[in-house]
Image: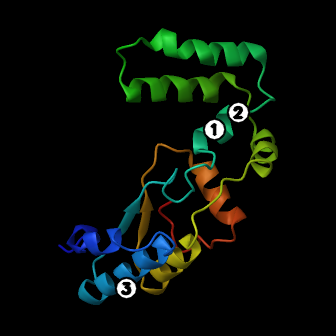
Amino acid sequence: MLTMNHINWTKFDRMKTNVNFSSTIIKALQLLTLRSSKMIVISDFDHTFTTFCSLQCHDIIGNNSEYTDDFCHAFDKTMVDVGENASFSDLWKVSHDLIVDKSGLTNEMFRRHFSRNVPNLRSGLKSLINVLRENKIPLFISSAGIKNVIVETLLAHDIDISHHENL
């Protein structure tokens, strides 16, 4: 199986910082495509597709001024209620269940808040996704993020995701 680990990344590490990293990844993918017809790309979303200083999926959902004070207090208390030795997955489940059950978040609230806080994407990402589509390479986004935010972010940046049904 040919993976991204088969690329000599030390060559890329020595490149000047003004080189568009995404174009380097695209060239590497094009080379790998020539060697493998069974390639897939698996990626995280927050701070991988988005820039480092961009809001993350949970920031988009969490920092919403339309939530009631009672809900915000309950959410803040979640860290204490779960306990200091809880796993990340325990905290994730409790916090997400609380959002779903008690936040009152509606699609309209989400869209209003999202439209004011669209995450920034990394330079060249649209080109990368086009190369994947042109070469029929599946893209899987494995993220602890929230699908609505991921999909809306890509659409807000005019990225056609219709061919990537696995988002």
Mark 1 residue crowding within 10 angstroms, few (<14) / some (14–19) / many (20+): some
Where residue 41 sits in the image (x, y, percent)?
37, 68
Residue 94 vertical position relative to residue 17 in the rendered view, above or below: above
Image quarter of residue 120: bottom right
Tag 3, which secondary structure? helix
Where residue 75 sits in the image (x, y, percent)?
62, 19
Residue 157 vertical position relative to residue 34 in the rendered view, above or below: above
For residue 13, side relative to residue 60 (left or right): left
Return the mark for residue 30: 3
Query: Going 49% across and 80% down the picture, which residue do you hit?
Result: 133
Question: Label 1, label 2: how many angstroms apart (C-alpha)?
Answer: 6 Å
Amino acid at the residue labelled 3: Gln
Q: Choose the circle earlier in sequence order: 2 or 3.
A: 3
Where residue 45 sits in the image (x, y, percent)?
50, 54
Mark 1 lies on residue: 59
Question: Label 2, label 3: how many angstroms apart (C-alpha)?
Answer: 39 Å
In depth, the one of 14 and 41 nearer the eye is: 14
Mark 2 lies on residue: 63
Tag 1, which secondary structure? helix
Q: Choose the circle earlier in sequence order: 3 or 1.
A: 3
Residue 138 vertical position relative to residue 82 in the rendered view, above or below: below
Specify the farthest residue to the bottom: 34
Q: Are marks 3 and 1 in contact (CB under 8 Å)?
A: no
Mark 3 residue crowding within 10 angstroms, few (<14) / some (14–19) / many (20+): some
Q: What kind of colouring is applied to the model shown?
A: rainbow
Where residue 36 sits in the image (x, y, percent)?
25, 83
Q: Are marks 1 and 2 in contact (CB under 8 Å)?
A: yes
